[in-house]
Image (cartoon, grey):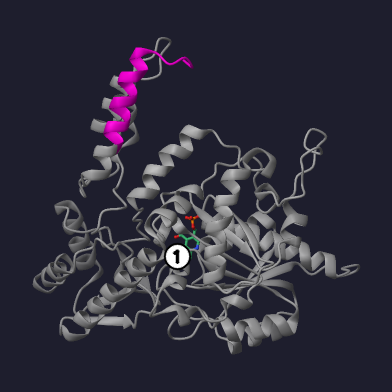
Amino acid sequence: MHDWTPELDALATEVLGYAEERLKRPKDPRWGAKSAAELSAALDGSISDGGIGGHAALDLFRDTLLPACRPNDDPMMLSYVPTAPSIAAVLFDTVVGASSIFAGHWEAGAGAIAAENQALRWLMDLAEYPDTGAGCFVSGGTAANLAGLVSARHRWRARHDRAGDTRPLAVLATDGAHASIDVVARVMDVDLVRVASDSDGRMTGASLRATLDEAGAVQPFAVVASAGTTNAGAVDELDAIADVCAEKGLWLHVDAAYGGAVLASRTHRQVLHGIERSDSFGIDPHKWLYAPYDCAAVLYRDPTAAAGAHAQSAAYLDGVDRRESNPSDLALHLTRRARGLPLWFSLATNGTDAYRDAVDAALRLTDTLARRIEETSELELVIAPTLSVVLFRRLGWTETDYRTWSERTAAAGTALVVPTRWRGEMCLRICIVNPRTDPADLERLIDDLVRA
Ligand SMILES: Cc1ncc(COP(=O)(O)O)c(C=O)c1O
């Protein structure tokens, strides 16, 4: 199993050749989930005493398993938050897998961690974080939010004596904040207090202040501001929120999992003004910064509280050289894949200008789409897009009309646009991150929507 054999030569050629073909040829946009029963029937016997061999297993993956997965990098995959990893990043993901790097501790993975830190520094420079800033790559935005809030609580406890105070600790966020904030609060067993959002879905400094004034039954320790809500792309008033947090001694965590890419924009960067004042932020390169899945980051203005909250100690670990910062100290993990390396390799290969161009291309396309919607009498914007999410209604449509059109369009492989809701009303939502989305295809989609 571990010795290189002539059979493995053949398998390497076949697997790596397939990976290359996978990168070159588009997936079928009509691929998608099949039933568990169907898939388990197809997989029956694939794990056996003798094994079925790599060739047969690869056939099974290519012919049956991958077609049961939605191609989230399809240029017309316009729902949820799509992905669009660069070719260089995907190629290097294979190298990371082949390298067996333990990237939890510097002494084990220094070379990889140093390169990851360069990529993190690029993100922190975009956010105008100080030199004291540090962070690590984590599995996703959910993990980044957990790490930020656990660190926030650690600092709050270190600064406050709670003797006699039985009020639950609480974090504040709007109801547009990502669902992961809710689950993180539950995991941490703290309360989540909702701050009212304005008509564009944003938390304002004033609404935060008003909520805090009435939050006497709980003890707030952190505020989560969204830099791009998933449903609407709304960006909270980061600067004004930072003022309130500074005044009240609250940790400000910015969830920039989706919208953080706009830090690289030449035209829209100012939308995230104020993020530089946060105590931590999360950003997902696997969403809109062209990294393959499993590449998110949590960044801290000052990593002291994060290390206090997360560092693991054990007899067999105590000898670990801690003179350099260890990624395992900065979030909830010990062993970790060097999941930031594909981003580093792609940045090194393509240069940061290519990233700026790609993010701005998505923003321009969003703008074109929004204008086209405004000019079309059958359509109406629900709110003006701030980032690359467009919410709009098809005038006169019932909920059944929305669902029918969405299902028909998906079945035809034209596009995936699933309906969402805004303030209770069903509408359509398009999220653009892929620089390969063709404006002509979007134009055809709108025509189809008007004719339907
Ligand atoms: C704003 C925001 N925060 C957090 C998350 C969760 O990220 P992940 O799915 O990588 O855990 C998402 C996912 O869409 C998101 O859009």
Residue 222 placement, left or right of 144: right
* Nearest to the observer: residue 232 or residue 324: 324
x, y percent for residue 103: 61, 42
Q: Nearer the viewer, residue 355 or 430?
A: 355
Count the marks. Answer: 1
Q: Amino acid at mark 1?
A: Tyr
- Answer with the quarter of the image where residue 224 lies: bottom right
- The segment highlighted magenta reads 1-19
- Tell me the residue that label 1 is attached to: 258
Q: Is residue 282 above or below residue 249?
A: above
Residue at point 44% right, 71% down?
264
Instruction: Bin the neighbour count of mark 1 within 10 Å (Cα to Cα): few under 14, some 14-19, many 20 and up.
Output: many
Residue at disc 1, CB closer than 8 Å to ligand 1: yes
Q: Please provide percent x and percent y for residue 150.
A: 69, 59
Question: Does the magenta run of residues contain 299?
Answer: no
In screen coordinates, is 11 left or right of 110? left
Q: Specify whether residue 214 is in view.
A: no
Helix, strand or loop under label 1: loop
Main secondary structure along the magenta-highlighted residues: helix
Given the current orientation, which residue lies at the most extreme bottom position? Answer: 206
Q: Position of residue 182 (x, y in %)?
A: 57, 62
Please say if 449 is above or below 309: below
- Residue placed at 30% from the left, 61% from the top? 434
Q: Is residue 71 left or right of residue 231?
A: left
Q: Quadrant of residue 180?
A: bottom right
Residue 18 among magenta residues: yes
